[in-house]
Amino acid sequence: MAGPSDSPSGVTPAAGAERADAANRPPISGPPTRPRESWRARLKRSRFPLFVILASMLVAEGGHWSGILSPVEHLYSDLWHRVSGVRYAPEHVALVVVDDQSLAEHGDIPMVFWTPLFARAAATLREAGATVIGVDFLFGFTPEDWISKLNLSGTDVLRDYDLKFRQELNQGKMVLAGAIVRGLPGQPDNVLLAHTDYLLSLPTTDFASHVGFADLVTDSDGGVRAFEVVPAVKLPPELAEGAPRLALASLLAARAGHLDKAAASWDVGGRTLETTEPHIISYAGPSGTVPRVSLSRVLADDALQDPSVQALRGKVVIIGGDYQGMNDVHTTPYSGRLITGGDGLMAGVEIQANIVETVLSGRDTREAPAWLRYLLLFACIGFTTHAYRRRSPWTGLAELGLGLVVTLVICFAAFQRFWLVPAATLQLGLMSAYLLAFSERLTSEERDKARVKTMFKGYVSDSVVDMLLSSERRLDLEGQSMHITVLFSDIRQFTTISEKLTPRETVEFLNAYYARVVAVIMEEGGRIDKFIGDAVMAEFGVPYPFPDHAHRALSAAVKIRRVAGEFQEWMRNRFPDRDIPEFHVGVGIHTGDAVVGNVGSEARMEYTAVGDTVNVASRLESETKYLNCVIAASAQVVLEAGGEIETGIHDTVRVKGRLEPVEVYEIIDVRR
């Protein structure tokens, strides 16, 4: 655009004149300023970038909530763990493990006979000042039961073999493990608990205070990343009363922290923990991070003088197995070998310890709240989208790569503060923004044509779509007022007919009838708006504004009446012995202004017409029952249709939803 000093037609002034003029001009302080852009122009120019941002956020959120991104999010979460290594030192929990050394020292004793050893260990831990002692073994039967099944003589001496273990249970410091047996779909679950003799040895019949479920929550890939305070279990009534309620680790934490086991939430470490929701385990580190003492050291005669045993004072202690060949090992975020390598599987007892530490320390890792996710999505996508406007696709691709790296830095920093920000969701939003932003290179005309073809395919004839695309008039999908004619038609006595047919036969006859009706409406240039059960709604004059839309609607109605008459024969031949009433239809038509455009929500949009014109057409179709006619059209339709129209009944009716009465005609025939 030419500026004030520019010469028209590209002619340059003489140098002398330029110098003389320059002498009289004030000094120039900088380049000339651009004209200030109006807010309307800025808004129009910002519409597409705003669309890119919102659409990309929608794609990212869809991926997040659908679960499609869960495997990728798990990979990133696992990566954060491995890069972090040891995250913190556990302060509230420790392990006493049955390790290879313990097995070597007591390998001559079958493990079913280890209850006296566990009793000695529990007594030592109690004297050492352990807060509560959990046993991650399921004592489903006693040594006495095991021996009695062998029918051996001289075994009466073993009757009190595990008396000390029962006495230790009676002290009330120990928490036993139970397990959930999941039932088949639709069937109740079951539980496996310690032997009845051991349960009766507890100081109270309140099993919920002394027995916890040791089951771990696994993701679809087999990894253990979360835990339930109260496991979801469906027990039959006879088992539900008095059954354990909490998971093993949660029960140990509740007893150590003096928490209400029946409460809906716990306030621990300055944070509120909902007991009815699953939570992410804040692993302290890879396998071996939780302090541990070998069971053999706890069983030693001088165990109470052992500094490692003395260090257990004031802590939750869990007794469990961690030896070669043990089955109770699991995949954790530290287990994989992607990129940084992993540290192998983790014993179930150490996972239980990590859960206890997560609860008591208040360090539970939490998913970022929705508002923070939205804010990060908007900031990252908005920044890159703004940059894309002035970049080539290749430069934009480099900026996309930088943006992906930045999201990883943000997510890792949040993880260090025990927040889990979904990295894959942010990255999906950035990649979507890149694709959408550079798709603007397509012409809006081609996009609109493709959209119109897709939208109206199957709802109007191909010739109408071609006319619409070839016209200069642009279709406003966001909503516009149009003068149209609306037609409603439904099947009389549909309920009676459907009662005499099977569901499959009902769908069959509806499809056969609708195929004929749709052909008639499209032949007259009408648009099928929707099928509403046994009714069909159509518009004439949209999407292409035929000037004779009223006449086309009347012609279509007359043809529908003829199709319905012919369809009676089809019904008689198809269902000869069903005593089906005669097939009849009713048709209501009205002409007027209506709002036409995409109506609905982000989840589902529908191009349709709304307004008084639609309501009147629908009500007139209902009035045909009382007027005893097939086609009822308003006077406005007859007036605008022109041509030769043969009418019958002429009346004035009041329709629901409208104050003014409607003048209505029965339509017999229509000719040009």
Image (spheres, rainbow, N blue to C red):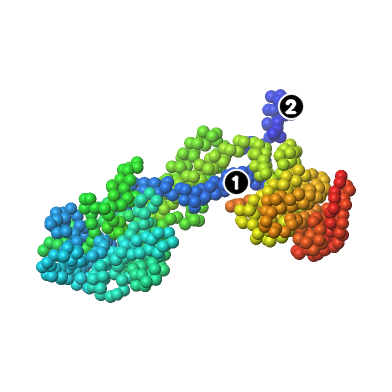
- Of 244 and 102, nearer the camera is 244
Compared with residue 341, is residue 158 higher up or lower down, i.e. above or below?
Answer: below
| Residue 611 appears in the picture as rendered | no
- Residue 347, label in figure: none
Look at mark 1 in the image and give the residue it sits on: 51
Q: Percent x, y for residue 44?
A: 66, 45
Report how far apart the C-alphas of labels 2 and 1 lie in the structure: 41 Å
Q: Secondary structure at mark 2?
A: helix
Q: Residue at x 16, y 55 (%)?
A: 103
Q: Amino acid at mark 2?
A: Ser
Q: Percent x, y for residue 375?
A: 51, 52
Q: Residue at x 64, y 57 (%)?
A: 501
Q: Residue at x 69, y 59 (%)?
A: 579
Q: Amino acid at mark 1?
A: Phe
- Residue 9, label in figure: 2
The number of numbered discs placed on residues in the rendered structure image is: 2
Q: Residue at x 33, y 59 (%)?
A: 215
Q: Percent x, y for residue 423?
A: 44, 47
Q: Percent x, y for residue 163?
A: 17, 71
